[in-house]
Amino acid sequence: TLVIVWIGGVIVTIWCTALTNFRLARVVKAKSRQLTSQQLREVDRFSRSAGVFPAPEVRFSPDIDGPALLGVVNPLLLLPPRFFDRFDRSEQALMIYHELAHFRRKDAWWNLLFCVLRCVFWFNPLILMAERRFRLDQELSCDQFVMSDEPPSQRALYATAMLKVASPKYSSSLIGFRNNSPEILTRVQRLQHHRISPAQSVFGPVGFALL
């Protein structure tokens, strides 16, 4: 009986997850629009500077607050409609570098793996907490990656850009892309500790392996 209940839960969870993602993709496809040639050239410059070429397809979506990467096989980089007006060029570069860091690290594939785990362990309430922490760690890691080669003066600029995204004035209506204010504040606070010392680089992985 327990096996049957577990299999039934797996099927239902997979169905709900697939339906949510299908609706999300349909909304994005219906409401997104293309960038101008000049804006595409600007994004291409950012992408080449970040060492990502060719860059993923880029489109405007009216239902997001800040840049977001959507999709696994053919990722789509979504930008808010007034992205090039709300943020100055330095802020644009840092925010796009962050999303391209997700792209380079194949975070979408890791998220897919965690989605499979969530479907298998649907009965465990801790899996949702673990997934939220997993996503936050991805964001913190990409923040560290973006800031690793930037001067200290850029930290304030990057923090300002993130706080703009979290502003209620630009709240999103698209499920999955709402920026969580506590998590944004956590990311801003961690910016002052964005560099990893040599000791952390060595003892961190060793400690994790022993654990």
Image (cartoon, rainbow, N blue to C red):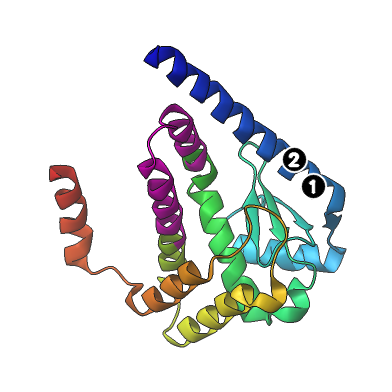
Percent across and percent down for residue 35 are 83, 61
Locate the C terminus and report the quarter of the image it occupies.
top left
Q: In this view, does 97 lie above or below 52?
A: below
Which of the pair 145/33 is nearer the observer?
33
State the count of labels. Answer: 2
Q: Which residue is drawn at 60% across and 73% down?
A: 166
Q: How crowded is mark 1: few (under 14 residues within 10 Å), some or many (20 or more)?
A: some
Q: Which of 203 and 179 is in front in this view?
A: 179
**What is the three-letter code of the residue carrying label 2?**
Arg
Residues shaded magenta: 111-139
Which residue corresponds to mark 2? 23
| Residue 70 appears in the figure | yes
* Marks 1 & 2, CB-CB < 8 Å contact: yes
Q: Quadrant of the N terminus?
A: top left
Q: Name the residue under label 1.
A: 27
Residue 84 vs residue 128, the one in the foreground: 128
